[in-house]
Amino acid sequence: MTSSVLDDLKKSQILELLEQGKRVDGRALDEPRAISIETNAIPKANGSARVRLGETEVICGVKIQPDRPFPDMGDKGIFICTAELLPLSHPTVETGPPGPDVIELARVVDRGIRESHMIDVSQLVIEKNKSVVGVFADNVVVDYDGNLFDACSYAATAALLSSKTPKWNWIDDTPTLVEGEETPVPIITIPVSVTMAKIGNHIIVDPNGDEWASMDSRITITTDSDGNICALQKGGSDGFSQDDVNRCGQISIQVGAKIREKLKQAQMAGQ
Amino acid sequence: MGGRDATMVLLDENGIRCDGRKVDEPRRIMIKAGGLKNADGSAYIEFGDNKILVGVFGPRDVHPKHMSNTDTGILRVRYHMEPFSVGERKNPAPSRREIEISKVIKEALEPAVMLDKFPRTAVDVFIEVLQADGGTRCAALSAASVALADAGIPMRDMVAACAAGKVADTIVLDVNNEEDQAGQADMPIGYMPNLEKITLLQLDGVLTPEEYTKCVQVGVDGCKIVYDIQKKALQDKYFGNGGDQN
């Protein structure tokens, strides 16, 4: 990938502005873009959300269905979160198997929600060791303007908060649907990921597309409702000082708390 | 990965862990620089029961050509586990986990390697996990740094790596496989001690803000222990007894 003259110009402009404490779109360094969350966007799914983070747009649909438990995990339901970049999201996206970037995206989004223990999977058992409830949160990116990690994470979290799970009984060795009995997915905590980019010596929250293309390295930190840190991923071709890492931890807790309120509001509005 | 022993004591009343280590003690680490005839640089590491071999080629021509960059050399990393390296046979095709780890290790090494000195070329790092026992990415990264140095590729620093984590409500150094399966948090760290830069950092598991800060500190201190062993491996090969030049 050879960077174009335009990319170099953009990067030097972004850096020049940061030296004055400013960003290309006028935000404060620790200010995420406007977030809009629409829940139940896909009524046929068991839960869903359409999230816009600036001009990045992600749709997440949750499907809930009976599944066989993983070996040694017969007393726990299944949670799986994926992410995919659709070809209509950006001219450079091609169809075909996902590359390393998209595989990392999906795994980081899944890990953030999984490690926070957002869903109480112990309540999602139909018949121990035989049948459990599987919760699948699938993200699709429909428009790209940087920071897919957070956009997908918010979409999946908002969709899960809006999800209702059907009930199955174990009859004649098969899970049998009980009509008309739906309950909210058991939620323990609300994870929020906050992605920060390092450009020069500056750390900025929620990089947009141009900032994403200009960054030296990035860090994504997920916090839970108690203000604990539960997942982290560093990326990009440079490093962070130990002070940076500690500071990013604090930023993720502060910024994450505000975004958690927005996720809660969206949940209330959808009910 | 097999069942967990629910009765296993992760940390006893004397602060001794399930494999007999103290909280701030890494597993036994042995690194050998060189060893492969055909690779431009190589290293072998034993990190506890992990056994990992790394071979480096380059700087060399880039194939396919469209990947080459006129401004800088590129680094390519493949982390791969042998089918026999884990309890149950692993499918030899690269898994999503291996693809992610390859990327994370590549991005951890890039700040160390002076790729801009070799535009239009590639440096290829091949990591083969022969036996895995928790913490393979850190062991692999540490060995890869030694292999790059062994290949004579100009570097700003070596990346040393070690994990810290939370086991039985205590922050400990170098989480092993049992502790990872049963433990509360695992934080692999890659660190360049001379430049004081963290180049690999991941976390899964719940930490309070105080534990988070402590965990980073414990991990960085562990990396410094690994760094000394990396330097000794290079000294042994190049300045040691008569110099075994392979």
Image: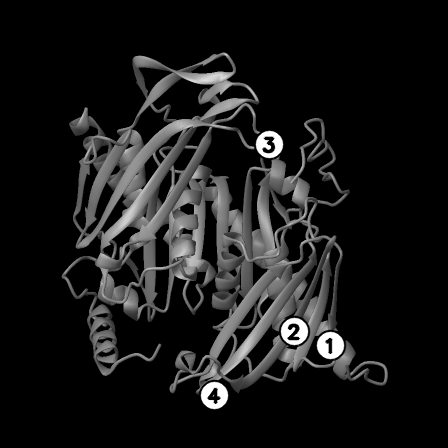
Label 2 is placed on what type of residue? Gly
Q: Are marks 1 and 3 on the same chain?
A: no
Name the residue carrying label 1.
B36
In the image, residue B11 above or below residue B45: above
From the image, tell me which residue sits under label 4.
Answer: B117
Residue named by callout 3: A71
The CA span between labels 1 and 4 is: 25 Å
> On residue B63, which mark appears?
none
Q: Is residue A254 visible?
A: no
Q: Indicate which label's residue lies in the foreground, 4 or 2.
A: 2
Q: CA distance from mark 1 to mark 3?
A: 40 Å
**Spatial distance from mark 1 to mark 2, Cα to Cα?**
7 Å
Q: Residue furthest left?
A: A26
- Labels 1 and 2 positioned on one and the same chain: yes
User: The disc labelled 3 sits on which kind of residue?
Assistant: Pro
Which label lies toward us, 3 or 4? 3
- A46 or B211, which lies in front? A46
Which of the image's four quarters has the C terminus of chain B? bottom right
Whether residue A94 appears in this view of the structure is yes
Are the two marked residues, 1 and 3, in contact with CB atoms closer than 8 angstroms?
no
The x and y percentages for residue B190 are 55, 62
Earlier in the chain: of badge 4 and badge 2, it is 2
The residue identified by callout 2 is B55
- Percent position of residue A112, x then y: 41, 43
